[in-house]
Image (cartoon, grey):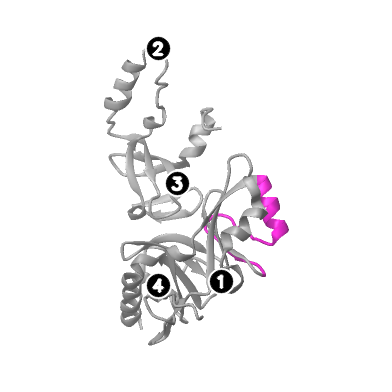
Amino acid sequence: MIINHPLLGPRDSQEFVYLGDAALIHRPDGMAEGALDKFIDYTYLRDNPAGTHRELWYHEQGDRSWLVVTRNTVTHEITAVELARDVARTEGRSK
Amino acid sequence: MANPLKSLTPLGHDKPITEIIGAVTIIENVGTALASLASRRGREAEVAGAAQTAGIPLPGPGRSQAAATYSAIWLGPEQWMIEAPFATHEDISAILKPIFGEAASITEQTDAWVRFDLTAADLPALFERLCNYDLGRAGVGAATRTVIDHLGCYVVRRSDVEVSIIGPRSSAHSLHHALTTAAKSAF
């Protein structure tokens, strides 16, 4: 499988490690009201779609950037690759 | 009194090795001082300005660039490895810190790495056996980190016929073994 790194171009997926659902970016505020329930959801509940899935990959043997990869879990087709940094910044975090 | 402490090369000898295997020349290069440079958040423009004044190139993603004294390899977003001659820049981080002040984080890297310079007319044939990185498509000035025999190494294409491999010094012998094995099978 080839992952088309947004900065470095096509790279072999051997160079990457997989973390999981990109929803992990949305870590809840531990000090907010109802934090316990939110953390239970965040820690244990994941969608497991047969189809398009946004997931976090780490370019461990490359430039060590975190990526958000949109991949079809049935066909392994990759439709989008973004830097996780940019995704978090568009959502108004890590300014 | 002469200094009783003699430094060893990464491969553990008094002098760096030069080997010729078929069409490949492998040189253990100990003449380069290294330091990593990372812009601090929000200070990127300051770092770029200071680097330009000091004659330090800051290449874009997947590239390396050489200037008169310094050369640099892109490591990641807003991060570079700076190279300079060891003879004049042994204390490279102390030389770089005043240039960038508080705008960047600089870490001495010289003794963490072993550098092998490989020269051959047909380098892609050798690198097809060594790593996933497609050297045939990477032109002169390309630089990247990739895996060679389970070791994370930087591959820097200095010219059509010369490539530097910068790998972990503590695994210098393993890396050297990988290079000589590939060279013997390729040519």
- Answer yes or no: do the residues labelled 3 and 2 have beta carbons within 8 Å? no
Seen in the picture, residue A52 relative to B77 is either above or below; the reply is above
Mark 3, secondary structure of its residue: loop
Estimate the spatial distance between the alpha carbons at disc 2 and disc 1, rounded to whole Å. Answer: 57 Å
Of residues B47 and B58, the one drawn nearer to the viewer in this rendering: B47
Q: Residue under circle 1?
A: B86
Residue A40, can we see it?
A: yes
Sequence-wise, which precedes: disc 4 or disc 1?
4
> Which quadrant holds residue B103?
top right
Tell if the residue under mark 3 belongs to the same chain as the one under mark 4.
no
Which region is colored magenta? B45-68
Q: Quadrant of residue A26?
A: top left
Name the residue at the top extreme: A33
Q: The residue under label 4 is which amino acid type?
A: Pro
Amino acid on which disc 2 is placed: Glu
Residue corresponding to mark 2: A33
Q: Which residue is mark 3?
A: A65
Residue B104 horizontal/vertical position (percent)? 60, 48
State the separation of the CA atoms marked 1 and 3: 30 Å
Q: Position of residue B24 (x, y in %)?
A: 42, 83
Front: mark 1 or 3: 1
Identify which residue is drawn at 31% across, 70% down.
Answer: B174
| Residue B111 against residue A49 in the figure, above or below | below
Can you identify the residue that label 4 sits on?
B10
Residue B30 horizontal side relative to residue B150, left or right: right
Q: Residue at x 27, y 31 (%)?
A: A48
The residues tagged by marks 4 and 2 sit, at their Cα atoms, a distance apart of: 56 Å
User: CA gap, disc 3 to disc 4?
Assistant: 29 Å
Using the rendered image of the protein, determine whether residue B134 is visible from the camera's viewpoint.
no
Q: Which one is in front in this view, the residue at disc 3 or the one at disc 2?
A: 2
